[in-house]
Every structure is written in C-alpha cells, then in structure tokens.
Image (cartoon, helix red, strand yellow):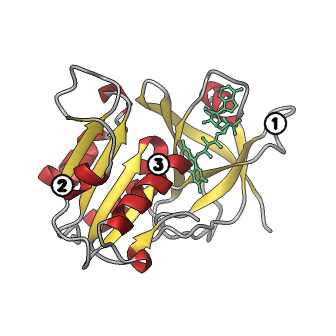
Amino acid sequence: MKSFQLKILEKSKATHDTFVFKIEKPKSYSYVPGQATELSLLKEGWADVKRPFTFTSLPEDDYLEFTIKTYDDHEGVTKRLGNAQVGDEVEIGDAWGAIAYKGEGVFLAGGAGITPFISILRDLRQKNKIGNNQLIFANKTNDDIILFEELKTILGHKFQNIIENQEDSAYDRGRIDKKYLMENINDFKHQHFYVCGPEGFIKAVNGALKDLGANPEALVFEK
Ligand SMILES: Cc1cc2nc3c(=O)[nH]c(=O)nc-3n(C[C@H](O)[C@H](O)[C@H](O)COP(=O)(O)OP(=O)(O)OC[C@H]3O[C@@H](n4cnc5c(N)ncnc54)[C@H](O)[C@@H]3O)c2cc1C
C-alpha cells in the first residue's frame, strides 16, 4: 500500500471539539466522495498509530480536507490532532470505503458520522443534484452539530436535527428510533438509506429501517 507524507496547510474550528484540516494533496491522488483513509500524525511516538478519517473535500479540489472530532479525555490520535499546527506533517494511505452515493434517499448521521455525507452532499450540490435527498443528523447537544449553516444551505427544510442531551434544544429531542423514523420518513421501500455514526448507532438505525420495510440492499454503511 502506498503512503504519502503531507503538510497541514490550514486548521480551523468547526465546533468546540471538531477541527477542519486542509492538507497538501499528492499529485494524481484520487478518491470518491464518502471514502476514507488511514491517517497518522508524524510526531515522535505517533507516526505508526493510524486511524481512519474521511475526506470532506471534493476529488477535484487541489487540497485534501478532513473534519476531525477530537477526544481530549484520553491520549489518542484525535487529541494529538487537536494540538497539531499548520506545518506539521501527517501520513495517509490510499482511499478506501464502502460509502458512496447510489441515488436519492435519506442520510442518517450520528456525530462525526456526518463526514462521509459532507463530501457527498457538497458534490451533489456542485452538480445541482441535491433533489429530494434528506438528512437526519443526531447529536448530543446543539453545539455538537458540525457545519450546521452549510448543511442548512445545501438541504433547506430537508435537513433535520435530533438532540439527545439538551433539554432546551429547539430541535427534535431524543434518539433516532423506529417511531422517529416512521414520523419523519414517508417511503421505506423505494429509496436508499445512508447510515454513519458510532457502531451502536449504525446497528440500531439499520435494525429499525429493516423492521420498517427498508430493503437491506438499499442500506449504505461502512461494514
Ligand atoms: C471508516 C471510518 C471513517 C472515519 N472518519 C472520521 C472522520 O472523518 N472524522 C472523525 O472525526 N472521525 C472519523 N472516524 C472515527 C475516528 O477514526 C475515531 O474517532 C478515531 O479512530 C479515534 O482515535 P483516537 O486515537 O483519538 O481514539 P481511540 O483511542 O482509538 O478511541 C476510540 C474511541 O474510544 C473512546 N476511548 C477509548 N479509550 C478511552 C479512554 N481511555 N478514555 C476515554 N475514552 C476512550 C473514545 O471516546 C473514542 O471514541 C472514522 C471511523 C471510521 C471507521
């Protein structure tokens, strides 16, 4: 497998714990919106510690972008990335992953699970093909919603938020369960479902979708 050592060109904040990194792009590097790569930070003791992260840039951009939620409560890769600076280097491998756009449907994301959908939705918007796609985004609090304004601009009223842990949130409250899906999706049989988030989220949402009649072949998620 190939590997590429690349400089961080820009770092900005998307939320209180999520950073956007623009990184050098190797010549003729290619990926499909929705794909990820293994990434490590080239700092002493960390160069071999690889974690998967998803490209949020578009394949034709002349840089690579990653949107990374950091976990400061333990010594992992994302905590290191939270402290990384412009000019620091990362290493990435080839692009891989099962999440790709297959046609109109409902995107269901939990937390940082929004990242493959950012690239897919930016790509569709650029091609003027947003159509009837719908996004349901689950987070703990309002402040955890990544790229709220951009997603609202892309999807308008087809962008819904559901918040688990903030009582005064004006968005829908709770978790994505069967009842919520029934109330918010009008067709389970003839569209795709794109599901991404923590393992428990994927399992619960896929299970509920199947119970409601979704064709297992129409579920798109990282296996
Ligand atoms: C295909 C794929 C694509 C992904 N793309 C993205 C992306 O684009 N952006 C993104 O932000 N994430 C993405 N992720 C998730 C990302 O890979 C993880 O957040 C990352 O691996 C965490 O690395 P870490 O070394 O910081 O934590 P790890 O040490 O690997 O821990 C992983 C999880 O366990 C918990 N944990 C483990 N140990 C402790 C501890 N001692 N104390 C407290 N909590 C602990 C953390 O809360 C964390 O959620 C993706 C995952 C996959 C599978």
x, y percentage for residue 164? Answer: 34, 32
Residue 188 visible in the current orientation: yes
x, y percentage for residue 173? Answer: 24, 34
Which residue is under mark 3?
A: 201
Q: Residue at x 27, y 75 (%)?
A: 191
Q: Residue at x 23, y 65 (%)?
A: 133
Which residue is under mark 1?
A: 46
Q: Which mark is residue 184?
A: 2
| SS at circle 2 | helix
Sequence-earlier tag: 2 or 3? 2
In this view, the residue in front, 47 or 26, is 47
Amino acid at the residue labelled 1: Trp
x, y percentage for residue 12? Answer: 47, 32
| SS at circle 3 | helix
Q: Distance between the residues labelled 1 and 3?
A: 29 Å
Q: Which mark is residue 12?
A: none
Q: Distance between the residues labelled 2 and 3?
A: 17 Å
Give the foreground label among 2 and 1: 2
Is 16 located above or below residue 189 in the figure?
A: above
